[in-house]
Amino acid sequence: MTNAAALPGQPRGGALSGPATARAINVLAPNPSAMTLDGTNTWIVSEPDSELAVVIDPGPLDDGHLRGVIEVAEQAGKRVGLTLLTHGHPDHAEGAGRFAELTGSRVRALDPALRLGDEGLAEGDVVTLDGLELRVVPTPGHTADSLSFHLPADRAVLTGDTILGRGTTVVAHPDGRLGDYLDTLRRLRSLTVDDGVHTVLPGHGPVLDDAQGAVEFYLAHRAHRLAQVETAVEDGLTTAAEVVAYVYADVDRSLWPAAELSVRAQLEYLREHGIIGQGG
């Protein structure tokens, strides 16, 4: 889930469906909306000469989409051997159980409630399948259970809703926390600097070919929004709804409920750091 339409970032092109890197193919779910952009990106990831593939975020419970993912994999000469989840929001994970039935694959996730099989996912894990290597990167903030997957062979990272191909994401308070999210962005920046990651394969929107630039944009955007919220409180606004009306005055009101989640996360962050009083 995103609020990308409410928080316009740097548009980078249109919807993606098809090969994105040497090892990643996108299948776009048919669930476009203001909150999901063009729809959810389901990723099929495999070594070029392998017979098995990992699917990341099978998406909503839409049988046509789930079967379409399998068909695209088969057209590429692949069989789905494993399913991974970046987080538990329904537009990414609701179809996972049905997808497991269709493919016979296990489902691995950080949240035990989302797993099908004995194995979960945790920091330091390296997922391997038929020569493919994916490194698990905890990236909480959008949600507490958010993960990204570093694909070193393609110098890419699959980010779920943590970084989007267009716009910016919700810090989904109370599960999502701004302090965690800022730490996550700094961790992803380290991947771009220390590990040479240059491509973002997002959960929504087009591929980004400047991963470091995207992370820096997100950090600057969050700092700007936080300053706006602090100013709103200094001007006497006391509730999250009032702050949303002040900070997001130029945004479609249908998106204000999503923006309010991020505002609540920002207010909590400002209180925790003593920048505003507990009543602010």
Image (cartoon, grey):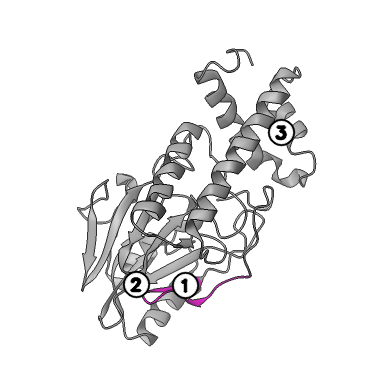
Q: Which residue is mark 2?
A: 102
Q: Give the image quarter of residue 129.
A: bottom left
Whether pointer 1 and pointer 3 mark residues with C-beta atoms closer than 8 Å, the reply is no
SS of the residue under disc 3: helix
Q: Which residue is mark 3?
A: 244
The front one of 70 and 142 is: 142
Above or below residue 61? Residue 263 is: above
Measuring from the top left, give residue 118's x and y in whole percent. 19, 53
Asked if residue 84 shows in the view, the reply is: no
SS of the residue under disc 2: helix
Residue 76 in magenta?
A: no
Indicate the amino acid at tag 2.
Answer: Leu
Q: Which residue is mark 1?
A: 26
Above or below residue 102? Residue 111 is: above
- Tell me the distance, in whole angstroms, between the alpha carbons under discs 2 and 1: 19 Å
At 47% across and 72% down in the image, what residue appears?
Answer: 26
Q: Give the image quarter of residue 56.
A: bottom left
Measuring from the top left, give residue 8's x and y in whole percent. 68, 52
Left or right? Give the position of 227 relative to 58.
right
Q: Which labelled disc corresponds to residue 122? A: none
Indicate the amino acid at tag 1.
Answer: Asn
Measuring from the top left, give residue 212's x and y in whole percent. 48, 54
Region in magenta: 14-27
